[in-house]
Image: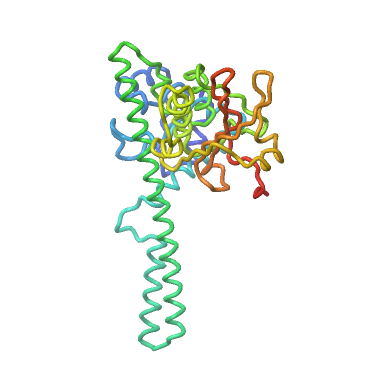
């Protein structure tokens, strides 16, 4: 029995998407023989396949909700609310995916402004002309900001795909060398909590997760693959540097080169940490160590756009203790 009622979903998406439901597990098995593992839909998951889908399609284009996503009580996904999420996801893309010949509302507004400007010129109504020009400039500025944001998102999507390709190439090399990875290890992570779980399993010798009470392990950060790569960077480049197996004079530059838009800081202000100990300490090995180092991405107050990973190197156990994962740690500028 699917976790999401397919009939309610189909009713909600009527006219804009086809809803196909596998009758049994044989369908998923057959699909897995035709598609790469990272593009299939299996085990009760839900996936949106866009027009023009191919075996070589990018995973970020075709959103997947796993059974874990659908069953996560923190999301409180009932069939109706999930249908709203899928509808919003499709609408967000569809509104910018029309034919160049399609007369959008934005296009109509632009034509109307041109008509007003032309009429004001003919009538030599300079006040109305100035107002019309101002409105046209504001609209174009808004559009430029929107296009810059879309360009940034496209660049980030490209980076994530490059990371995915590296991971899949690594899995292929492992398989050729007889070190076959599990299916889960070959698939990209889809949530921050999944990135944490996978890092705990994959890097148990290098990383310890001792998240404090201010952490948000279920962070809605929109790019969980980056979080996974950040943990991988800690367990490799950073770890090798701390154990003096490999020199790295510029950790900040190294993480920026590894993950576009990310940065490293080796300290926090002592006054800030002491004023907000619950944010800058964690419990580990019977102690309460400070976690002054951190990796960060984004400066937005929106949890989808920013994340922090605070940690420290524990010389006693020779491990990296990760004590905080979340949007922002409290400081003097916090509300």
Residue 235 placement (x, y as % from top left): 47, 24
Q: In the rendered view, does 274 fall on the left or right side of 297?
A: right
Count all numbered tags in the image, as a single digit. Answer: 0
Residue 315, image quadrant? top right
- Quick check: can you spot residue 327? yes
**Residue at the (52%, 20%) spot, across then down:** 200
Give whichever of 195, 268 is nearer the camera: 268
Q: Quadrant of residue 15?
A: top left
Work out which residue is located at the far top of the displayed protein and give it. 178
Q: Does 313 appear above or below 139?
A: above
How far across and how far down the image is residue 119, in percent?
38, 82
Q: Nearer the viewer, residue 106 or 169?
A: 169
Work out whether residue 76 can be spotted. no
Q: Residue 154 at x, y = what percent?
A: 37, 45
Establish if 101 lies above or below 125.
Answer: above
Q: Position of residue 59 (x, y in %)?
A: 37, 33
> By what rule are the colours in the image chosen?
rainbow
Residue 193 found in image quarter:
top right
Figure check: 273 above or below 193 = below
| Residue at x 37%, y 76% (from the top left corner) | 115
Side (left or right) of 327 relative to 263: right
Looking at the image, which residue is at 40% across and 60% down? 144
Give the residue furthest to the bottom. Answer: 124
């Amino acid at each position: 029995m699917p976790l999401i009622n397919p009939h309610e979903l189909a009713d909600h998406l009527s006219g804009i998407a086809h809803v196909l439901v596998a009758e049994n597990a044989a369908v998923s098995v057959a699909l897995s023989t035709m598609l790469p593992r990272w593009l299939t839909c299996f085990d009760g998951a839900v996936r949106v396949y866009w027009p023009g889908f191919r075996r070589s399609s990018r995973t970020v284009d075709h959103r997947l909700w796993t059974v874990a996503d659908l069953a996560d009580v923190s999301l409180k996904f009932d069939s109706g609310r999930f249908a709203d999420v899928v509808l919003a996801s499709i609408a967000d893309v569809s509104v910018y995916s029309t034919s160049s010949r399609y007369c959008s509302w934005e296009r109509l507004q632009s034509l109307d402004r041109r008509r007003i400007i032309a009429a004001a010129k003919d009538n030599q109504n300079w006040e109305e002309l100035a107002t019309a020009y101002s409105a046209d400039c504001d609209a174009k500025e808004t559009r430029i900001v929107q296009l810059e944001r879309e360009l940034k998102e496209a660049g980030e999507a490209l980076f994530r795909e490059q990371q995915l390709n590296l991971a899949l190439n690594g899995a292929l090399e492992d398989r050729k060398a007889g070190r076959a990875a599990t299916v889960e290890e070959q698939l990209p992570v889809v949530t921050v909590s999944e990135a944490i779980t996978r890092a705990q399993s994959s890097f148990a010798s290098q990383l310890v997760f001792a998240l404090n009470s201010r952490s948000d392990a279920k962070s809605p950060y929109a790019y969980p693959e980056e979080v996974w790569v950040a943990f991988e960077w800690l367990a490799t480049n950073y770890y090798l540097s701390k154990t003096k197996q490999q020199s790295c004079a510029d950790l900040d530059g190294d993480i920026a080169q590894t993950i576009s838009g990310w940065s490293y800081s080796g300290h926090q202000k002592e006054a800030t940490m002491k004023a907000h100990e619950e944010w800058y300490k964690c419990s580990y090995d019977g102690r309460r160590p400070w976690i002054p180092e951190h990796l960060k991405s984004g400066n937005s107050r929106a949890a989808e756009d920013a994340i922090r990973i605070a940690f420290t190197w524990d010389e006693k156990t020779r491990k990296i203790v990760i004590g905080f994962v979340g949007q922002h740690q409290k400081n003097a500028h916090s509300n």
